[in-house]
Structure formats: structure tokens, C-alpha cells
Amino acid sequence: MTVSPYLPLPYRIIAVRQDTPDTATIDLQPVRAAIPEPAPGQFTMLYMLGVGEAPISVSGVPIEGAPLAQTLRGVGNVSKAIIRLQPGDEIGVRGPYGTTWPVAEADGHDVLFIAGGLGLAPLRPAIRHVLAHRDRYGRVAVLYGARTPADILYRDELVLWRRMLDVQVEVTVDRAQRAWHGAVGVVTELVSRAGFEPDRTLAMVCGPEVMMRFSVQALQGAGLPSERIYVSMERSMKCGTGLCGHCQFGAEFVCKQGAVMRYDRIASIFTVREI
Amino acid sequence: MSASGLPKTAAVLGPDGLQALIAALAARGMEVIGPVERDGAIVLDRIAGIADLPAGRTDRQEAGSYRLADRDDGALFGYAVGPQSWKRFLHRPVETLFRVRRIGQELAFEPPRETPPRTAFLGVRACELAAIAIQDRVLLGGAYVNTEYAARRAQTFLVAVNCGDPAATCFCTSHDTGPRAHSGYDVALTELLVDGRHEFLAEPGSDSGAALLAYLPTRPATAADWAAAAAVAARAAANMHRRMPSEGLKETLQAHPEHPRWEDVGQRCLACANCTMVCPTCFCTTIEDHSELDGLGAERVRRWDSCFAGDFSYVHGGAVRTQTRSRYRQWMTHKLAHWWDQYGTSGCVGCGRCIAWCPVGIDIAAEAAAFVESSKREEDAHGIA
């Protein structure tokens, strides 16, 4: 019998970083064999013994000696259990699955990253890729919206990006105390501030569905064509391999034709409720 | 016609020949599964011989109704399809995928090693052969494979029995999936009840099917036997009155996710998931942990799931499809429309199970017709304007 695609590989947690009060990033190292190298935008299924599995996007790809990094918000049974683990503990990892952010298609374009909340996690490998190959791209902007200043992910890295003189980084929060000096408001308000040229820009958008909906509207309003807007969809997933049926979104399986999807291919169903 | 290109070596066997066929399958180490009567329904279970078959019984099916009745000809296969399909033996309702144990901080994953037993299915209808072919595409045709299904499928010997007495819920003729089996079987039987004789025309569909037939007490098929078998199929087709519309159905369903008919059917549907459980092609599953009491080990178990279940579409924060109409839309649009985009075929074979076993008698063919008709009316209205 051939090996089941559902069989995970054991991975050891080598570091746990608390990003925000409810979100942590774990660094993972294969105990023996490793999964194939994930590309920006792909996800894995993480398995916690006795609890179950959850699809989690890769927030750091294991290249140049870096570990596989995955960022989890403790909202479900699996994610809550995993972010409580300690270095040395093992979990199961299988994948990677799904489509990738169009970092190759974006070659020669201005690139606009729009992230809402935890949506910065799946975008981070794409942002890092673009910045690591900075000369291939035109203007680069990262627009990020979080609930409060305490919910901002990857603060150190945002500061690092902001210090680069060839990246525009804009951060906004929904609500803040006086100490916050940045913007307050929804991330879509940052789109006009980014001042991009619609005919040479490609946008990658990741966040809650309602945030993506308004972001797409803002981008289209600014003249960006649908075929240069990419979104990352979220649906229930049990297998990640197109066999369990849970993640269907119209005729698409989010685990196979997504999670990253070109907007014009899903535009007809994107705003249909409960699809 | 034979899959291997063999010359057609059809034979005729009597009930004793059928008994010998079952015995020969068992002698080849196969577990033989066939129709048996239990709990007021014809279900699928192990059989030892023809005495286990529901002789002289038939089923009367209507929307929301399934009843057994006697028939006076002593037919062994004088019924359509029961609540179970062969799916339960290939894509099992509950399946252990692997076991895992924690030793210290380490996790050890142990895949199961046993090979499934060789199994023969006796009495597979043409619509069910079509359903198996569809599940082959769904579960074996992609980048990832359902390995348990693959292992069972490779061990399966299929004896089809052409349908002679379809139920009122049947509409395989709409999908060209019956009533006569054309491919995908090892042996196909047609039950002949002519002039007081009780015989079966047996057609081989594979080398192993031909080899099996050669081993049984048979007589050569005559032109009269072929004519009798053709008459069985013709009568069955003529007795099927339900129709699934085909023209424009896919496009209509995909173009109208907000059609008022979804609310209409959503008001009637109980979201009980019966239709998905009895459907021979519905394949959705969930995977869960069955933990050991010491907390150190677990089994990963896959079981059938249904797009009608409340938590099927659950993502953090809640289900995507909270309303029954959204779940019915997902099921029917997937089955009759998206399936074409995903697998190049309809997901419906016309077996009618979802109609008979729906507690409120929702008829997928009638629902489909309602969409197509309303879309035609819409077109006509536009034509006038």
C-alpha cells in the first residue's frame, strides 16, 4: 500500500515567540525527513496529538539555514494547544499545499502588499522574497492594518523594513491609546496614500474576507485590473489535498486552486454570501 | 464490448450456475458481498449463496418513501437500489488512517500495514458502476490519492446485474448510466424470466471475468437469449419516467447563486444529510483524533462528513454556510455543476436514492427542472424585451 498523503512527518519545535497576546510564531525543525520547501503563500497541516490538525500558512520559509516558521493565533483547539508547546516538543507537519503568491509574475512591477491582522503572516515570505530580490521590482509598499497597537505582528521586522529607504511601510490600527502616533482607521484608507501607478502594479491582499473585499474595491477604484489583484481565501480544511471536500469555494478547492487566487477568476462568487 | 478485446463469450447459467459463481469467487479467496433483506430494506452484506438473496422481493420507491413488496416471479434481482451503495465497501464510512504515540517528547507515526481482503460485489447496477467510475476519478485521479480506497479498489471483483425493474425514483437514462451496464465490470448478468425458465445471460467484461465463466456450468447464449436480455433493458428504460434536465443545467446553477428557489428548497430541507449518506458519489470526509485514555496515543480516523452538517464549513469565528439554503445550494450546485469543472462529469448517476431517502421528499430532478425552467422563462422575457 502506498503511503497515505495524510501521514505527517515529526517536527521539533525549536523556538516559540509570542508575537501578540493571542498569537505566536513557532520555529520548526524536522526530526528526520523534511517536507519539500514551501513557496511563499503555501500552507501546511499541523498536527497536535490528541487534538487534531489545522491548516496553517507558512510565515517563514526554511531557506539559507532559517527554520520553517509558522504563525498561529490561538482561536481553535489545535492552534491553542500548539502555541502552548515548549521548545523540544514535537508536532506533525505535512504539506506544503496550495498555490503561491505571484512573486515571479510580479517581476518588473510595482508591488503592493495589503495585510489585515494575521494576514501579514502568509504574506511575510512573499515580502521577504521581494525585498531579497529588490532590484527585480519597481516601487514596493506594505500596507498593514491591525486591531490595536498590541496586535501588530512582527514589530521588529516592520521597523527593519521601514528603515530601508526603498520600501514604503504604512501601519494603521482600528483603535489606539494616546501613545500611538501612527494612523487610525481601516487599511483600505492607506491604499490612496500608497499612490501607485495602476498600469504597472500588482497587489497581494491577505486578511479577513471583509477586509479583502474592501481592499479589492479600493484597488479597482484606483484603476488596478482584477487580473493583477491576488487574494488568499480561507475555508474549512480537513485534508489539504483536495480529497475531503470541505474547502470548496464555488468550483474551486481552496487547498488546490488556492489559498492564493487571482481575483478575476473568483470575482463572480467573491461577494456571494455563504458560498 | 469486452474490456480486454476478447471475443464475446457470453454464456447462460441457471440458479445453480449462479450458486456455482458465488462458490467459485469464495474459492478464489474472495469475500462475496451481495443484496440481502434486512430491517425492511435491501442492504449489502456478506452472502454465502443464492439462498441469501432477496428472492421474490421488490422495492417500491417514491419521493420520501421506500417499501419492500413481494413479486410473483421469484426473481433474485427484481428491485432497484437500496439505501446503501457500494461506496461503503470502497470509501468506507469510518477508516483508521494511522496511529501515533508520544514517547517522551517524540512522536511516532505508524501507518497501517494490512492489505484489504479480496472482495467480490454481486448485483452491482449500471448506475453504481458509473458511481464507482466517478469515485475513481475523484479519489484516484488527482495529485493526491485516497490510498485506502486505491487498495480496496484493486482488490475488487465486480459482478454487475442489469436492471430489469427500476424504481419510480430512478432516472439513469437521463445520465446515460443505465439501465444496462456497458463497461467497468468483470461479469455482467441479465436475469431472464421467460416461459417459466429462470436463467442469467452472463457477459464477461475482463479476462478474469471470462476465466471465471469458463469454470461454471453454463450453456452457450443463443440469439433468443440476447433478444430476451435486450428486452429486459428496453422494458426497464421504458419504465423510467423521471428526467434530469441536462441542457443549460450547469450554467444555470452556476449563474444563479441568489435564485429565490434556493430559499424555497431551503425552507423544505431539514439539513439531515440523508441525501449525502445514501449518494454513491458523495465523497466528503472529516478526520478526527480518537485518543487513548493515557493521552499518549491516538488514532487518526477519517469518517464520512456531509456539506449539510452545521460545522462542515466551520472556520474560526463560525460556519461559512449558516443557512440551510446555502448548504442545499452547495450540495446541488456541486453535484450537478461544479463536478463538471472538477472532474469532467456530473456527480449524479440517476440512482434516485437521495429522492427516496429524503424525509421530506425533495426531488433533485424536480429542483433541477425548476431552475432550468425559470432560466428559460428569464431568457424568453429578455427575448421579448
Image: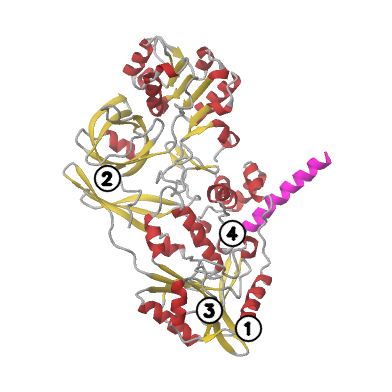
Residue A49 marker: 2
Q: Three-letter amino acid code at disc 4?
A: Val
**Quarter-of-image position of residue B245:** bottom right
Q: CA distance from mark 2 to mark 1?
A: 65 Å
Residue holding disc 3: B9
Q: Are marks 2 and 3 in contact (CB under 8 Å)?
A: no
Q: Which chain does the residue under circle 4 lie in?
A: B
Check residue B384 for magenta coloring: yes
Q: Secondary structure at mark 3?
A: loop
Q: CA distance from mark 2 to mark 3?
A: 56 Å
Marks 2 and 1: which is nearer the front? 1
B188 over A38 or under it: above or below: below
Marks 3 and 4: which is nearer the front? 3
Q: Position of residue A274 (x, y in %)?
A: 54, 40
Q: Which chain does the residue under circle 2 lie in?
A: A
Q: Position of residue A98 (x, y in %)?
A: 43, 38
Residue holding disc 1: B223
Residue holding disc 4: B360
**Quarter-of-image position of residue A238:** top left
At 55% across and 42% down in the image, what residue appears?
A250
Q: Earlier in the sequence, mark 1 or mark 4?
A: 1
Q: Which chain does the residue under circle 3 lie in?
A: B
Q: Is residue B280 visible?
A: no
Question: Which span is picked out in magenta?
Answer: B364-385
At 34% across and 33% down in the image, what residue appears?
A74
Q: Secondary structure at mark 2?
A: loop
